[in-house]
Image (cartoon, helix red, strand yellow):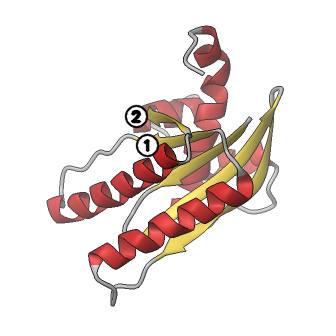
Amino acid sequence: MRIVGIDPGYGRTGYGVIELTGNRLRPLEFGLIETSTKLSMEKRLLQIYDSLLEIFSRRKPESLALEELFFSRNVTTGIGVSQARGVVLLAAAQTGLQVAEYKPVQIKQSITGYGKAEKQQIQEMVRMFLGLQDVPKPDDVADALAVAITHAHMVPYLSKLGQL
């Protein structure tokens, strides 16, 4: 099964595509979609959308995993991230991907075994799970891979419940 994890943002959207075979995880592609602050919001969202469709076409994932949106401080930033998230969901729906969403605590628990893990712990475990030499950079990419790994961990349970 191929899973794409997305960490949405309108300036930087992290993505990571992994393959789950049995209980083995293999990274296929990961990176960052960056948009220029000089572009209007609609152009930035279009760039994210087009880039995602290209990645989906190239890697052919079956599922898309996202972190549930949580923001408490900067509402303006939250609105922009929400718009980027909407574009991600639209691209997933148009390409027929199953979508799974996870709370931050679920991702931390899945990756480290501790629901209050620090970012560095999560990044190191992502590196180890995927057999990478270095921690994926920037944080957006590591976060995208973490949510994809979380979904991979949930696949056996979701299958038993008939949700896959």
In percent of width and height, residue 100 lies at 49, 33
- For the residue carrying disc 2, how many other residues have a C-alpha within 10 Å: few (<14), some (14-19), or many (20+)? some
Residue at the spot x=45%, y=34% of the render? Answer: 102
The quadrant in which residue 101 appears is top left
Residue at the spot x=41%, y=71% of the render? Answer: 46
Q: Is residue 121 visible?
A: no
**Quarter of the image where the N terminus is located:** top right
In percent of width and height, residue 157 lies at 61, 15
What is the secondary structure assignment of the residue under circle 2?
loop
- Of residues 46 and 133, which is closer to you in this image? 46
Residue at the spot x=82%, y=49% of the render? Answer: 131
Q: Is residue 126 left or right of residue 26?
A: left
Q: Is residue 5 above or below residue 163?
A: below
Residue at the extreme bottom of the image, as rendered: 38
What is the secondary structure assignment of the residue under circle 1?
strand
Residue holding disc 2: 103
Tell me how far mark 1 sits from mark 2, CA to CA. 6 Å
Q: Are marks 1 and 2 in contact (CB under 8 Å)?
A: yes
- Of residues 25 and 134, which is closer to you in this image? 25
Q: Is residue 26 left or right of residue 109?
A: right
In percent of width and height, residue 35 lies at 43, 79
User: For the image shown, how many numbered marks are present on the structure?
Assistant: 2
- Of residues 157 and 74, which is closer to you in this image? 157
Q: Is residue 106 above or below residue 70?
A: above
Q: Is residue 135 above or below residue 3?
A: below
**Quarter of the image where the C terminus is located:** top right
Q: Which mark is residue 79?
A: none
* Amino acid type, mark 1: Glu
Residue holding disc 1: 67
Q: Is residue 132 visible?
A: yes
In percent of width and height, residue 123 lies at 61, 52
